[in-house]
Amino acid sequence: SVNPDLASERQTASFCVERLTALLDGGAEQTRIRRAVVEAIESDPVFSRENQYFQTQNERYEAAVRKAVHLQKKMHEMGWTDNGPEYKYIYRALSGDVAFLLHRVFMRSISVLGSDKQVAKWIPLATQHKLIGSYAQTELGHGTYLQGLETTAVFDTATQEFILNTPKISAMKWWPGDMGRSATHTVVFAQLYIHGKCYGIHPFILQIRSLQDHSLCPGITAGDIGPKMNFEHTDNGYLLLKNVRIPRENMLSKFCEVRPDGTYVRQGSQQINYFTMTTVRISLISDEVLTPFMKACTIAIRYSVVRRQSKLKPGEQEAKILDYQTQQEKLLPQLAAAYAFHFTNNYLQELFNRGYAEIHRKNFDMLPELHALSSGFKAVITQHCTAGVEICLRACGGHGYSLLSGLPSLYTKILASCIYEGENTILLLQTARFLIKCFMAASAGQPVPPSVTYLAAVKHGKCPAKNKLDFLSPDIYIEAYQHVAVRLISNTAAKLQDLIQSGVKKHDAWNQCTVQLVQAAKVSKIYLLI
Amino acid sequence: SVNPDLASERQTASFCVERLTALLDGGAEQTRIRRAVVEAIESDPVFSRENQYFQTQNERYEAAVRKAVHLQKKMHEMGWTDNGPEYKYIYRALSGDVAFLLHRVFMRSISVLGSDKQVAKWIPLATQHKLIGSYAQTELGHGTYLQGLETTAVFDTATQEFILNTPKISAMKWWPGDMGRSATHTVVFAQLYIHGKCYGIHPFILQIRSLQDHSLCPGITAGDIGPKMNFEHTDNGYLLLKNVRIPRENMLSKFCEVRPDGTYVRQGSQQINYFTMTTVRISLISDEVLTPFMKACTIAIRYSVVRRQSKLKPGEQEAKILDYQTQQEKLLPQLAAAYAFHFTNNYLQELFNRGYAEIHRKNFDMLPELHALSSGFKAVITQHCTAGVEICLRACGGHGYSLLSGLPSLYTKILASCIYEGENTILLLQTARFLIKCFMAASAGQPVPPSVTYLAAVKHGKCPAKNKLDFLSPDIYIEAYQHVAVRLISNTAAKLQDLIQSGVKKHDAWNQCTVQLVQAAKVSKIYLLI
Ligand SMILES: Cc1cc2nc3c(=O)[nH]c(=O)nc-3n(C[C@H](O)[C@H](O)[C@H](O)COP(=O)(O)OP(=O)(O)OC[C@H]3O[C@@H](n4cnc5c(N)ncnc54)[C@H](O)[C@@H]3O)c2cc1C
Ligand SMILES: Cc1cc2nc3c(=O)[nH]c(=O)nc-3n(C[C@H](O)[C@H](O)[C@H](O)COP(=O)(O)OP(=O)(O)OC[C@H]3O[C@@H](n4cnc5c(N)ncnc54)[C@H](O)[C@@H]3O)c2cc1C
């Protein structure tokens, strides 16, 4: 039976709940599918999360592995497939509390960066779970600065192999999910050397554990990196390589290839090697950021309707805390943001699908825009949602601080999204670099990508708002945000030029503008959001 | 040996490190004592925290108990006492990772609220650890609204006893530290009933566990409330009471007393019963908030000097991340705030010591100001430091997210300080109520407490700043903050009156101004801070 305070609030809705649900899901059919998935997962005891907060790290990991294995059976039983409409709801219903998540990133890397032959060889093996993949990019010494990665892959023409090494302690791979205990294979990023010349970082498929007895392969040392703020169920790992040899065919070679004689051939930009991150960045917004944020909003708002504390009117019953203005000011903007991000994400998803198809056809024109948009939105959305979940947690007072409210683990998990797949500050700086470039182009009358045409359309004149209520009109606030976005970018571009003209070196000038640049990048994304 | 990057940064200091250290500690002698304590604690293997992140909740709890017991021996051995100058450094060196912390709050309640006879009876028992105390105020249903507490204490004239009950599930005590497994006694807050009449909430000393075999006393059900975001080492507990009888002498009666015939006698305001919270609130600022915040700043800033990532100048070595403007913008304001809070805290401490002495002499004049200042500063400082620790964590990228950096646990612990000892929004609203009252008094030409005299001294006229650099002058920015503080309070007071005059009920009008009031309270504290 529904709590009467909740029931009475629900009766006051001014909209049709089913229609809104269908709109959010993308149609009534999607809602039906989602509910069926949730029902199937929640009624299955293997997927129960009932005890999770009382489990040790090892128990969490083992449960996640058990669930991953059971999920394969379940999918078979239910007729769900990896590419079916159910897939995204499965992950959501499991709250991501399942092992082998990097397996999909492994597959994605191969699909995006692998040659047709590589795709034909590895994807079926991965789909049938004949191996467990992971994604090994970050090292102890380098996360952000990928050019600085120190793992090496030296091509040996004699044997037609690459020899992989992590020559220093700082070259040790550090963080890859599923690497600590689970993975049998990984896509490892290393500096490619041919005949003593370095060609920059490239991705290689590497087996790290035996398919017979799961022991580490020769030359490989790997294990768990220890406890983290969340992700107890994941075995983030480290990896040391000592003269590990892999065949020439294991370098992912859709865009770059090493010929048997050591000739290096490349199509498109070197940047394409990071494209897996762009694709992951986009899918994480919905799975790892929006879903937890929406859950936090739901928990906190529902709780605020059933929690009564203090009297609003003397002599009456204690008030629902949601009736306090301060509580509304905490929670309602979060709810509004959740809607805004949801629709922005749909737009991004569409844009990305188009871009992805083009890149598959080896047309790289959309790459810079896609990279800038995915980076900027990833940073702005993860940042806002992380702060929002914290607000939700604190808005529940003491009960919010109990793990049993669900809010602490939502928070500690979403926080990581500000760091992985590109640390937010770095992403904003990259977005800013793109914006400055486009602004310069627009100022010179050159064409710019569609998402930044507003940079060319600077309107002068006064803000038409006469009093503060005018700012509630979408026309006015959209224009105001556009104005702020353009202004920040043009001011920073001007400051940058002034500094350079006054003799400051280009890189120093850039560094002196970075705080402003980050601000400009944020505002430009907020403008697009609304 | 010191990392060369750290060593070279240290050489550039423009001040004398030893002098600054002594200034922060309050004199070179204090520094000496602090270092001796740290040395003694850190070299003692029982106090080691080496394995803490790999321990289960139960292991953490047991280690904390072991440390608490060992600490008593150690203190005896070292000649340290509870009131000695070493005490505060002990807690700091242990990082609070020790059991029975509520024991001090228990003692504090008795010292503050107990009669001389009660103090004479209980304090020696507590000092000698013949019992383990806790503090049971919050219930499942009520944390903020203390008048709403539902535990009852009915006076039975026949037996000269109070009969304690938690009549509903929502009356169950919930959260008290050390209550789940450790405490033998507690100060429990309950609604006092005499001859059927309710006199509001009062504190009672209650034994909950046997001193022989630690079993629960008759009529008592208690246990652990389960996992929380942090405080794994603490057994926060619940407590149910069924017709538990305690002697009349167990009501803390320095200010209120029930005579044998049931006559109720009170001195001073009812508010005095919450005074333990005021005293705890002030001591927590330094122990639970500033110390962790300073640690986080130290960790993040040091790390930023040894972490090199990306190149600032092409062709050169990778840069220390602290050399990036964005990194400085994250961390240096935190460091500055740590200093500001440190000195504000010293001021608060002094003010509090004076007030405490007065209250001991039953002069309650300073109580409202003390309450408003401690509430407002507690809220503003905990809020800022919590956000600051999060910034420090994120500024360390992936390594900050590992528990081994120390930052995640600093964050999850400091976050609780926004909730306990008065949830921050509530504290700010109480501060605002005080400010509005003082503003009205000042406007009417009546005298106001010293910390708010600025409300009377409203200066009109233009801000003397001519350009943005002028705001770096302390005279100008202090005046500007004062102006903002007064303006926010006077505007809100005016809005409040307008609403009431236009027919809105007083409590509704108040609610409609609360967001603004919270803002006003925050700014007024920031003004005092600088
Ligand atoms: C939960 C989790 C899961 C992960 N999973 C994987 C995985 O599966 N596979 C994998 O390969 N990696 C993984 N990672 C690693 C992750 O991708 C990196 O942590 C991330 O890229 C950030 O890099 P970093 O840790 O080196 O941070 P750093 O680059 O060291 O950042 C530290 C600080 O320096 C600043 N900084 C650095 N460079 C600059 C600059 N040029 N200008 C201004 N400021 C700068 C940053 O803004 C930040 O404040 C994971 C990380 C986490 C937390
Ligand atoms: C780690 C920890 C340790 C603790 N230790 C102890 C202990 O040893 N002993 C003990 O007795 N208690 C303890 N507590 C309990 C703590 O004191 C309470 O959680 C705290 O007082 C907040 O009360 P609440 O949880 O009922 O929050 P609520 O009052 O339910 O607050 C929930 C939300 O409602 C809002 N709200 C409530 N009333 C109003 C109002 N009138 N106007 C506007 N907004 C309102 C709040 O701002 C908040 O956003 C502890 C709590 C924690 C987290």
Image (spheres, coloured by chain):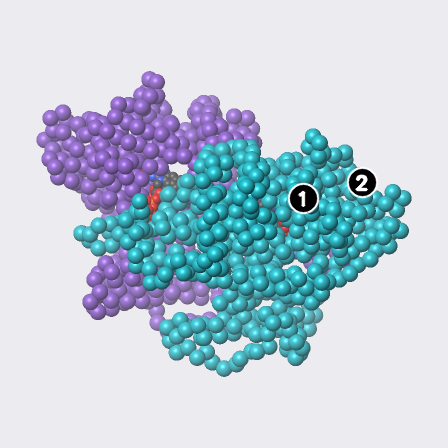
Chain colours: A cyan, B purple
Give percent across and percent down for residue A24: 46, 59
Residue A359 in which image quadrant: bottom right
Q: How many marks?
A: 2
**Residue at left offset 64%, top offset 66%:** A369
Give percent across and percent down for residue B363: 23, 44
Question: Which residue in the protein does label 2 denote?
Answer: A245
Instruction: State whether residue B361 appears in this view.
Output: no
Kind of element beneath mark 2: strand
> What is the quadrant of the N terminus of chain B in the image?
top right
**Residue at left offset 17%, top offset 27%:** B161
Which numbered tag is attached to residue A126? Answer: 1
- Amino acid marked by disc 1: Ala
Viewer-closest of B324 and A57: A57
Q: Are marks 2 and 1 on the same chain?
A: yes
- Amino acid marked by disc 2: Arg
Kind of element beneath mark 1: helix
**Chain of residue at mark 1:** A
Residue A175 in which image quadrant: top right
